Image: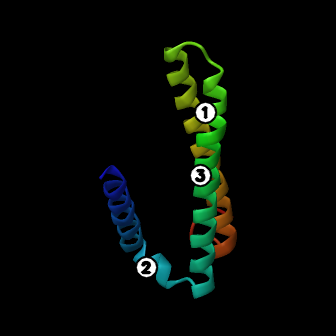
């Protein structure tokens, strides 16, 4: 049940972002939109893999539960920050500055 809720929430979020940036999307060509979508999906997949496998590997070596929570939070925050920077730079290059940064 929670998987369905998460999927629905993700779809609602994506639709909201698309409607919010409707004017910017009209300025882009079709291949630019597909490029951003593919880069987004690949980046999210890589980030999720690093958080899940890398995070579990590192956290598995820590004996204290409270320290595991802190390290898990730190790993998630760092991976999300690096992914955001990466996505902004690539979106800027793909869209020639309409999204992200050049």
What residue did someone put label 2 on?
Answer: 23
Snapshot colouring: rainbow
- Check whether the beta carbons of the residues at disc 3 and disc 1 lie within 8 A of each other: no
Give coordinates of residue 19: x percent, y percent: 36, 73
Residue lying farthest to the bottom in this orientation: 30
- Location of residue 89 by image quarter: bottom right
**Which of marks 3 and 2 precedes in the sequence?**
2
User: In this orientation, which residue lies closer to the viewer: 14 or 84?
Assistant: 14
- Identify the residue shown where x is 48% and y is 84%: 26
**SS under mark 1:** helix
> Badge 2, how many Cα within 10 Å: few under 14, some, many 20+?
few
- Location of residue 32 by image quarter: bottom right
Give coordinates of residue 101: x percent, y percent: 64, 62
Tell which tag, 2 or 3, sits nearer the viewer. 3
- Location of residue 17 by image quarter: bottom left
C-alpha distance separating marks 3 and 1: 22 Å
**Which of marks 1 and 3 precedes in the sequence?**
1
Tell which tag, 3 or 1, sits nearer the viewer. 1
**SS under mark 3:** helix
> Badge 3, how many Cα within 10 Å: few under 14, some, many 20+?
some
What residue did someone put label 3 on?
Answer: 84
Task: Say which mark, if any, is on residue 56.
Answer: 1
Seen in the picture, residue 43 relative to 32 is either above or below; the reply is above
């Amino acid at each position: 049940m929670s998987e369905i809720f998460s999927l629905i929430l993700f779809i609602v979020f994506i639709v909201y972002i698309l409607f919010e940036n409707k004017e910017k999307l009209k300025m882009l060509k079709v291949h630019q939109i597909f490029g951003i979508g593919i880069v987004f999906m690949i980046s999210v997949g890589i980030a999720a893999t690093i958080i899940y496998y890398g995070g579990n590997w590192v956290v598995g070596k820590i004996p204290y539960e409270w320290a595991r929570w802190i390290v898990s939070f730190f790993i998630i925050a760092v991976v999300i920050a690096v992914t955001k920077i990466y996505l902004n730079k690539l979106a800027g290059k793909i869209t020639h500055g309409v999204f992200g940064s050049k």
